[in-house]
Every structure is written in structure tokens, then in C-alpha cells.
Image (cartoon, rainbow, N blue to C red):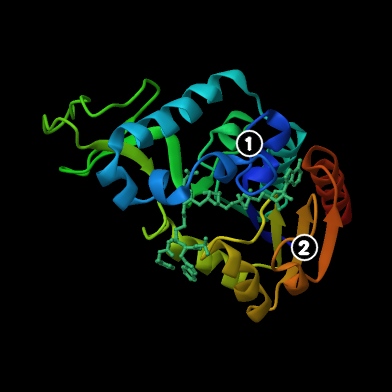
């Protein structure tokens, strides 16, 4: 149990005050994902998409990591001390894993605090608002800058590294995700095929709960630190 892959979703950031997507009153209850999280939606109404991401990017200034984020950073540090390895893959585009001390975070759906030029593909750190007037600092194009996130129909990032880590994992842990979005939702099946133990830590059973060999349900801020401490105690 020294090689662990953890997949996180928006549920791990919920107690920090960041809205999840599919819970009651969540992001997709307020926005149509086809309008704000697809390249077609961006082409049709870039102002709406920029507003959607500007609000979320700005919202990051008001939130802090919660105990679940800090627990995963502790797991990464202490696993390294005993020669183990944590691969942390997140569907989240917030920076709370980094701000809690996690060193190696694979953002498979991109990052709110980055932007990318649709013309020259250059990427930039991004804290200010984007608009159709934003000029690319690299190629000078105006209106080509977009949030550096992965929209529906686009290819997720770090897939090779993630699937290789899953193939070698002793343990796959899914935290705070509904299991509604692929390919992330397919990772547990890949982990089972690779012979890894699979545990789900979530508020309630996800759509692929039946594929997990163990599960704990509750608030991430409570159940994740408990699970991390028990897991590390088991290595002592
Ligand atoms: C792709 C943008 C091809 C960034 C997002 C089969 C195979 C492959 C693809 C597909 C397939 N079937 C359909 C597809 C297409 C599609 C898809 O999955 N559609 C769904 C709707 C059916 N997938 C794609 O288009 C992906 N690209 O397939 O390319 C490909 C495939 C493989 C290999 C190469 C190429 C791209 C998907 C990425 C889309 N972008 N967001 C942004 O704006 O944020 S997705 C969006 O959903 C977010 O990124 C979010 O992270 C993600 C998943 O949502 P969750 O994080 O799980 O959030 P949710 O609200 O759903 O659930 C929260 C959970 O937390 C709940 O269970 C809740 O109970 C729990 N919770 C709440 N509070 C707490 C808690 N748990 C603990 N404590 C709490 N306090």
C-alpha cells in the first residue's frame, strides 16, 4: 500500500466554500455546461464564458484549503519519507491542493489561474479577468485568450502519467466526486483491473460506488484526515 493514486473532485473543496457541480444548487443548476464549458459555447458567446470563469477565478481569493486538502499534503510528505509515492490527480481547477502544500498535483481539467492563447497556444499565469479584448502577450492576437481549462469534448491532461500510476498502484482513492464525468469516472475500473484496492471517500455513494472495494461516507474535512491518519499508522 505504498503506491497510492488519489482522484479528487469538487466535493473536496465544498467545505472551503467552492460550489460543486451536480449537488442541489450547484454550478450546473445555474449554468448550462454546453454554454460555458464547451469550445462551441465559447465560440458562440465568449463574453458569457469569460464572465463564468472570471467569477470563479475571483472567488478563489476568498477561500482557503480545508482539512481534507491539508491531509492529502501530509500523506504525500509522509509517504515520500517511507519510500512510497502519492499521485494526486484532480478534476478541480482551483488551487487549494497547492495552497495546502501538495507538491505534485495533476490538474486533468486544467487550472482557473492559467490562461491559454487559442492562436499561439502559449499559456500564462492568470489572476485578472479575461475578456474578448484581452491581448495575447506572446503573439499579440486579440480575443484569442481563453481559460486554460479542459472543456467537454476536449482531451484531459496528464492521461498517460495518470494511467501509468493507476497500473502500478496498490491503492486507488476517489474523494469528493460524483463519478459522472469521463475519463475520470473510469479510473476506478482501470484500478480494479490493475489489482489495486479501491476506496471511495465521499458525502454519498457516487455513480460508480459499486466498483469500490471500500467506502466511507461523510464530510471530506472529517473523513479524509481520519483515513490519512489510519493509513499512515498502518505503515508505522
Ligand atoms: C473527453 C471544466 C475524449 C473545468 C469539466 C466516455 C469516455 C470518454 C468520454 C466520455 C464518455 N462519455 C461521455 C464522455 C464525454 C464527456 C463526459 O464525461 N460527459 C459526461 C457529462 C457524461 N467527457 C469529456 O468530454 C471529457 N473529454 O472525453 O475527451 C477523451 C477521452 C479519454 C481520453 C482522451 C480523450 C472532458 C471532461 C472535462 C469537462 N470539464 N469542467 C471547469 O469549468 O471546472 S467537468 C466538471 O465535472 C468539472 O471539471 C468537475 O470536476 C467534473 C466532475 O464533477 P465532480 O468534481 O465530480 O463534481 P460533482 O458536483 O459532480 O460531484 C461532487 C461530489 O462531491 C458529489 O458526489 C457530492 O456528493 C460530493 N460532495 C459534496 N460535498 C462534499 C462531498 N464529498 C465530501 N465532502 C463534502 N463536503
Query: Is 128 rendered above or below residue 29?
Result: above
Look at the numbered disc 1 and give the secondary structure of its residue. loop
One can see residue 97 in this view: yes
For the image, the number of numbered tags is: 2
Residue 215 lies, in percent from the top left, at 83, 61
Residue 61 lies, in percent from the top left, at 54, 19
At 37% from the left and 20% from the top, the residue drawn is 128
At 42% from the left and 27% from the top, the residue drawn is 54
Q: Which residue is mark 2?
A: 199
Residue 150 lies, in percent from the top left, at 40, 50
Quadrant of the rendered image containing residue 190: bottom right
Q: Is residue 191 left or right of residue 103?
A: right
Label 2 neighbour load within 10 Å: few <14, some 14-19, many 20+: many
Mark seen at residue 225: none
Pick whichever of labels 2 and 1 is earlier in the sequence. 1
- Quarter holding ligand 1: bottom right
One can see residue 236 in this view: no
Look at the numbered disc 2 and give the secondary structure of its residue. strand
Spatial CA distance of label 2 from label 1 is 24 Å
Q: Is mark 1 within 8 Å of ligand 1?
A: no
Foreground disc of the pair 2, 1: 1
Query: Is 89 rendered above or below residue 15?
Result: below
At 50% from the left and 41% from the top, the residue drawn is 31
Label 1 neighbour load within 10 Å: few <14, some 14-19, many 20+: some
Q: Which residue is mark 1?
A: 19
Q: Is residue 232 left or right of residue 85?
A: right
Residue 42 lies, in percent from the top left, at 31, 43
Q: Is residue 117 left or right of residue 202?
A: left
Query: Is 92 rendered above or below residue 174?
Result: above
- Nearer to us in this view, 163 or 117: 117
- Nearer to us in this view, 22 or 210: 22
Amino acid at each position: 500500500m505504498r503506491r497510492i493514486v488519489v482522484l479528487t473532485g469538487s466535493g473536496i473543496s465544498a467545505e472551503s466554500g467552492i460550489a460543486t457541480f451536480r449537488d442541489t444548487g450547484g454550478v450546473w443548476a445555474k449554468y448550462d455546461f454546453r454554454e460555458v464549458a464547451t469550445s462551441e459555447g465559447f465560440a458562440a458567446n465568449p463574453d458569457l464564458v469569460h464572465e463564468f470563469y472570471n467569477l470563479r477565478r475571483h472567488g478563489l481569493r476568498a477561500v482557503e484549503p480545508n482539512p481534507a486538502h491539508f491531509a492529502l499534503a501530509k500523506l504525500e510528505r509522509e509517504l515520500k519519507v517511507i519510500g512510497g509515492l502519492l499521485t494526486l490527480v484532480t478534476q478541480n481547477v482551483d488551487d487549494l491542493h497547492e495552497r495546502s502544500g501538495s507538491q505534485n498535483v495533476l490538474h486533468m481539467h486544467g487550472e482557473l489561474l492559467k490562461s491559454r492563447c487559442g492562436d499561439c497556444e502559449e499559456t500564462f499565469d492568470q489572476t485578472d479577468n479575461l475578456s474578448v479584448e484581452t491581448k495575447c502577450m506572446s503573439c499579440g492576437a486579440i480575443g484569442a485568450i481563453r481559460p486554460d481549462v479542459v472543456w467537454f469534448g476536449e482531451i484531459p491532461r496528464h492521461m498517460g502519467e495518470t494511467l501509468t500510476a493507476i497500473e502500478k498502484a496498490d491503492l486507488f482513492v476517489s474523494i469528493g466526486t460524483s463519478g459522472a464525468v469521463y475519463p475520470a469516472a473510469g479510473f476506478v475500473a482501470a484500478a480494479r483491473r490493475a489489482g489495486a484496492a479501491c476506496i471511495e471517500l465521499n458525502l454519498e455513494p457516487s455513480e460508480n460506488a459499486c466498483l469500490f472495494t471500500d467506502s466511507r461516507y461523510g464530510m471530506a474535512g472529517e473523513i479524509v484526515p481520519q483515513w490519512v491518519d489510519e493509513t499512515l499508522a498502518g505503515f508505522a
